Structures are given as structure tokens and as C-alpha cells.
Image (cartoon, grey):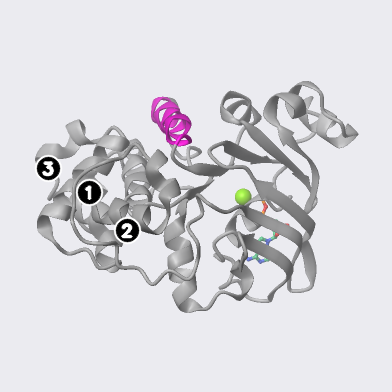
Amino acid sequence: MNALATTLTNKLASLTHRTFAYTQSEPFAVDSKFAHASDVQLATKDLNVYINGAHILKNVSVQIPKNKITCIIGPSGCGKSTLLRTFNRLNDGVDGLKMDGEVTLGNDNILTANSGQLSELRRNIGLVPQRPCPLPMNIYDNVAYGCRIHGIHNRKKLDAIVKHYLNAVGLWDEVKDRLKTPAARMSGGQQQRLCLARSLAVEPSYLLADESTSALDPISSKKVEQLFTELKKDYSIVMVTHTLRQALRIADYVIFMYLGEVIEVGNAHDVFDNPQHELTRRYLNGAFS
Ligand SMILES: Nc1ncnc2c1ncn2[C@@H]1O[C@H](COP(=O)(O)OP(=O)(O)O)[C@@H](O)[C@H]1O
Ligand SMILES: [Mg+2]
């Protein structure tokens, strides 16, 4: 039986919707203080973020729907990345940062999570970065990295996990004969899919992506985009998109921000076809970007 799937399935019956099934035997050894996010909602309420006194996020209240792609859109500097990064506390290291309000996963307050909880939180809410950032190690070890941190060392299990997630991102056939070569030798598009495989290998429920295709060529970008649309049956995805066109192609749900405020949220076709707010209308018409 699959270590990841076994534990999570034991913990939460809701994981049975997962289609990624491979075989392992031991439970996934994490000290979980958080309920699994497939059961619970990721949300913010009256969230304010200040950096050195500047009010960066203003009373942001959003709920992230499950098994959908939520795109955060809005002009440059409006706070998209800052909002995305609050979901797994990646702003913590920013000098002069203050936050109030709530960021919650079900009943758990992300803003007050201790370091043990934070580690589990970040496993559960994975981040796909803007630029491909493979770890300075070989392809195999990149995918196995998080699993090892979470206590999986059995070679056969790791082999199965690595194969499974490289397959999930469409890389297995491309790299199966060079798993021990440095990840840095892969193309940019391959590296980004590898980073996605690394995020997926620890079985998150949410995936955060910040302009994750912006550094890729158009073909690689389309591949990653397609992957996200396939992955949403198993994951809830929050994307900051670098182009409105990309949001139009893949968003199910949209959060439109302007100057640190959430102006409009809703199903993508409602927001795109019939925006309620003048600012949204102007942004969609290209009045500013
Ligand atoms: N580390 C930081 N120090 C100071 N200001 C920051 C920092 N990070 C972000 N900001 C400011 O916060 C605002 C929102 O930034 P960001 O969330 O990156 O916007 P977006 O992703 O929408 O382009 C911007 O005005 C930016 O200059
Ligand atoms: Mg940004």
C-alpha cells in the first residue's frame, strides 16, 4: 500500500477521490495538527498586511473553492503575490511585515501555527514558484526530497513515488533513463514540471502557483497549464496569472484585486462575461494592466 495514500486515507476518508494510486505499506509519518484540507476550506477573513507601515492587503476576505482553479488577477503591485504567500505563511521572513485578521484552513488559524504545524501546513499547501527552481541534486532526489523529510526512506516506496509523480507531470518517459543526472541539466519547461512533481509528491490538497508559466516558452507554458487543468480533479489550485488570457483559458473562479483590495470575486464566466464592478470592467477591457 501507498504510504502517503494509506495514512491520508486512514486519516480522512475523503481522500478516496484521489486517482493517484500506487502501492506502499507504512503510514505517512507526519505529526498532523491540521485536518486534511480536502475536508476543509482555505480562507481569509478581514486580512490586513502591512510592510513597513504601507497597507499592502486591505480587509481581504476570500474563500478558495475546492477542486477548482482560482485565478488571482489584477494589475502589477496590487497584492496578488502577497495574498498567495499568506496561505502558507511565506511572507514571514519579510522585514517590517505585520498582519492581522484571519487566514484559516478549516478551524485552524494559519497565522498562529507553530513551527510543527507550519511544516504540515506547507506539505498540505504546496507552492509552485514563478521560476523553475530545482534543488541542486539529481532528478530522482528532487522528487523524493519532501518524502524523505517526512520520513519515507524505503527505496522501493521512493522509486514508486518518483515514477508516479514524474508520470503525473508527463516527465517520466522523457527522463526515466537519466534519473541520476542533475536536474539543472533539464530544459526550463522540464524543470518547472519537475518542481510540480516535487510539490505533488508530498500529497498536498492545495497548490499555490505564482505566475508559474511566465518564465517558460509558449509550448512548455501550455503543457504546465494543461497539467493544472488535469490536476484540479485532485487538488484545489490557486494561481496568480501573468496574463488575463491565461485566466480566461483556465480559471473556474476569479479574485480580482486592485491596490490591495479584493474588488470582485466569482465564477470565471460571471466575472469575465458580466463584471459587476466598474474597475473590473475597465481592467478586463485593458484600460490598465
Ligand atoms: N518585501 C517587500 N518590501 C516592501 N514592499 C513590498 C514587499 N513585497 C511586496 N511589497 C509591495 O507590496 C505591494 C504588493 O506587491 P505584490 O504582492 O508583489 O503585488 P503583485 O503580485 O500583485 O504584483 C507592492 O506595492 C509591493 O511593492
Ligand atoms: Mg506578483
- As drawn, is 186 to the left or to the right of 96? left
Q: Amino acid at mark 2?
A: Thr
Q: Tell me if I can see residue 237 in this picture.
A: yes
Q: Amino acid at mark 1?
A: Ile
Q: Is residue 225 left or right of residue 161?
A: right
N-terminal label among 3 and 2: 2
Viewer-nearest residue: 81 or 150: 150
Q: Residue at x 63, y 25 (%)?
A: 248
- CA–CA distance in space, label 1 to label 2: 15 Å
Q: Which residues are magenta?
A: 219-233
Q: Residues within 10 Å of mark 2 (few under 14, many from 20)?
A: some
Q: Residues within 10 Å of mark 3 (few under 14, many from 20)?
A: few
Q: Height in image: 74 above or below 152?
A: above
Q: Is residue 81 above or below residue 67?
A: below
Determine contact: label 3, label 2, CB under 8 Å: no
Percent of width and height locating residue 31: 38, 72
Q: Quadrant of the C terminus?
A: top right
Give the label, 3 or 2, closer to the camera: 2
Across and down, in percent, residue 175 comes to 18, 38
Q: Amino acid at mark 3?
A: Arg
Residue 50 image-quadrant placement: bottom right
Residue position for label 3: 178
- Is there CB contact under 8 Å for labels 1 and 3? no
Res. 211 visible in picture: no
Position in image of residue 130 (x %, y %): 49, 48
* 103 horizontally vs 249: left or right: right
- Report, in whole angstroms, how far the alpha carbon at label 3 lies from the one at label 2: 31 Å
Residue labelled with disc 2: 7
Q: Secondary structure at mark 2?
A: helix
* Residue 202 pos. (x, y %): 34, 55
Q: Secondary structure at mark 1?
A: helix
